[in-house]
Structure formats: C-alpha cells, structure tokens
Image (spheres, grey):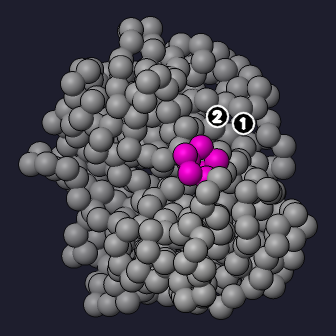
Amino acid sequence: MTIPAPSPSEPPHPLDSGSEAQYEIDKLMALHPKGFDLSLERITRLLERLGNPHERLPPAIHVAGTNGKGSCAAVSRALLEADGKSVHVHTSPHLVRWHERFRLGSKDGPGQIVDDAVLADAVRRVADANGGEMITVFEILTAVMFVLFSEHPADVAIVEVGLGGRFDATNVIKSPAVSVIMPIGLDHEAYLGDRIELIAMEKAGIMKPGVPVVIGYQENEVAREVLTDTAERRGCPMAVYGQDFFAFEEHGRMVFQSQAGLMDLPLPKLAGRHQLSNAAAALAAVATAGFEIQQETAERAMAEIIWPARMQRLTEGPFPALLPAGSELWLDGGHNPHAAMMVAETLAGMQDRMERPLFLIAGMLNTKDTDGYFGAFEGMVRHVFTVPITDSDAGVDPEGLAESAGRAGLTAQPMKSVEEVLRLLGEGWNRLEPAPRVLIGGSLYLAGEVLGDNGTPPQ
C-alpha cells in the first residue's frame, strides 16, 4: 500500500537553475505517486532489472532510528575519512538540492556531493529500467544510490534509512557490516504506529541474522527491550549504549569507553550534550564494522564533523546580517518532541542563556506533534514567530501554528517569512538589551529553505 507523503514535489530552488538532475527528478515527481510504498517488492524488482547493484556495495554501515541518524552518519564519515578511507554516504531528506543525498567517496580527500551530470545519468538509467511501472520516487532514488555506490569504488558505504526500517527501500541490503539503531521516539506515527514498541519493531527490522548491531542511547526502556530482544532472536552480536559502551564529558572533553578501552577526545563539533551519545554510537559502529580507529585519528575527526541544519550556527550570508550586532542565529531541522527537548537542553546549557533573550522562529508540517514540539521550550522562549513552509503543501498555517504554541504556554504571532522576522528584530531592537539568540526550527523543509535563501547550502 502506498501511503501519501507529507509533502508533494518540491519546486526547484534557484540554486538548482539549470540542473540536469533536477530536471530528470522533476519528471519522475510528475509521473509517480508522492508517498512511501511500505514493502520491498517494487524496489527488489527494479534492482533485479539493474543487475542487483545493492549486492556490489563496499562494506555498509546501515543506520536507522528516530533521531540521531544523520549525526551518527556524519561522525562515522569523519572518523573513516580521517583514517584515509573513501566513504560513500546516503542521507535523506535533502535540505536544498537532491544531490545532497548522494556523497561519493574519494581516494584523494573527503567525499563530495555527486556531480550533476553523474546524478542525471544515473536517474535516467534507473527510470528507463523501471519502464514507467508503479513505483515511488524515493524507491527510484534509493536504486540510484545503489547504482552510484556500486559503480564508484570506495572503502565503505554509510546508508541512512529513509523511513522506519523493516520495509524501507534501503533494507534490501542483505549483509551490512553493521546495523545501527539510534534513539527511538514517536514520529511518523501515521506510517509506523503510535506506540513506541511498534516504532521500535519497525526500526529493528534492519537487523539481519548474525550481523552485528550497535544500539545507541535509548531513553525509552521499552524501545531498548524491543531492540535487544530482536537482536537476541536473530543471533546478532550486540554493542549496547550504557552497557557495552558510553560517553561522558569531563574537563571540556569527551571520554569514550568501550570494551576496547578508553579514549579521551575533543568534544564533537556538533552542538548539544546529546551529541556525545551520538558520537559514541558512531565510534562503536565504525569499530564493529571492522575499522580500527586510533586515538590520534579520532581526535582529528571530532574537529571535522559536518552536519548542516542540526544546531548549526549561521554566521555568513544575508540572514545573520539582519539581526543586531552580537546576535546569534541558530538553525535546527528537528521536528518532533524528542528532538525539541534535545535542542532546548542545548540552549539551556549555553553560558549566557540568562542574559540573552531567546526567540523561536518555527515552521512545521501537519504530520508532526506541534504542541509537543513547542512544549519543550516552555519557560525558555520570550516569543515565538510562526512562518509558512513554502516548499510543502503540508505546512501548518502560521495562524494555526501560533495557536499550537499558545497551547504550550508560549506567546506567539504569525509572520509571512523568516526574513520578515529577522528584519523586525533587527530594526526594532532595544540596543540597551543584550543581543538576542534566535533559533529557526521545527522542520527540515524550513531549514532547507533558510539555507537556500541565505546562500549557504550544504557543500
């Protein structure tokens, strides 16, 4: 059954003007249903026609979870590239351009986002192989990923699950080097179920019999039990956060402890205390996959992690310049209550939080728990500005979103755009007050719009 997606096709951003790959993907978006096919039948059929490229991947790190998948992928990539490995990376969704989903490894340095012509050619070949049969665009693009990763040599592939796990199109990988399950919370309930154990079961679906699994930090004990029970039934050697490995901050550094011993490392270049456990899961995953990372290599890697729109501070481009001098502008794509709590905790831990007033600019999709998201910021935010998401028909109307913020105990007002809010704050700010801290959050779609309009897309 194909379930409608929370967003229709995304119009090409000005940054994609003249993109050959964008043109090919737009044709697919017009032809195929916008949704997720929660089965593996169509992707399996298509891959067979393509010669089963998913069976010719380098060793794969397969990552599922509600939150932290991208951070785990980013840290794993940094660790492996610092060790001189060439690393393919598949992530979704993209923020500004479709190309971001496919990063190809290189022997000559860090991997690069796929070239436009290379991506366009792969999309055409996969579409031709499908022959116009019923399929979703995500499945086609997953097949594109397998084609690209099989045709370009690399030492390792990091593959992030798109939705759930058991029936996600990436789950045709038969024998990954390691399966990784990051923190699980309520999200995508319409697709995965409205109870944490149901969601955990879907995520656990990427575990393969006998294949090692790394289970990251799980706040919910029920989720943890589902994951460990599944691993035991399938005979998967396990490394479990809090049992077999963990991390903590000490004297401004990260201490990682596993059965192999201790590592004293710099804090990961990702804002938020929760990133310690995410980085720990990546360290465990890379080791479990068979890659031995030395202390010196891990030290370099922690300073080289890049993961846009996850508590990313914007310092360049026109948007930061609209705010009063000395302001801080942060961007985060987290869109569920658990992610919001992590962001709120990060903001609460900033040294000058009692001095700087905090403002929230929020845009969200109607598939998300908006009340739960805003509830994480109660007592912290001076005021909320709600904005539309122009790249999705599923965006919550700013008026309705402001009402949701009000139900969570926050004062809020609807606005037309992020730029309008930043101009309002910049032009009307009382210079006798400390410069504000501004967070833009609530949706990866909104984060992508901001990065595109600010001229700072992922590289």
Residue under circle 2?
Answer: 204
Left or right: 24 in relation to 280: left
Q: Residue at x 43, y 30 (%)?
A: 252
Observer able to see residue 12: yes
- Note whether 129 is above or below 44 in the view shown: below
> In the figure, 379 relative to 26: above or below?
above
Q: Position of residue 446 (x, y in %)?
A: 57, 74
Residue extent of the magenta highlight: 347-353
Q: Is residue 254 visible?
A: no
Say which residue appears at 22% left-offset and 69% top-offset: 115
Asked which quadrant contains residue 387, the reply is: bottom right
Q: Which residue is mark 1?
A: 201
Q: Is residue 349 magenta?
A: yes
CA–CA distance in space, label 2 to label 1: 5 Å
Count neighbours of disc 1 (C-alpha within 10 A) and say few if under 14, some if 14 to 19, many if 20 or more. Answer: some
Q: Residue at x 79, y 36 (%)?
A: 197
**Does the residue at mark 2 contact the one at mark 1 (Cβ under 8 Å)?**
yes
- Name the kind of residue labelled 1 in the image: Met
Kind of residue at badge 2? Ala
SS for callout 1: helix
On-image quarter of the C terminus: bottom left
Pick whichever, 52 or 357, lies toward us: 357
Q: Main secondary structure of the magenta part?
A: loop
| Residue 57 percent across, percent down from the top left | 31, 42
Q: Quadrant of the N terminus?
A: bottom right
Q: Is residue 389 above or below residue 359?
A: below
Which image quarter: residue 232? Answer: top right
Examine the structure image and report whether residue 191 is included in the region drawn in magenta.
Answer: no
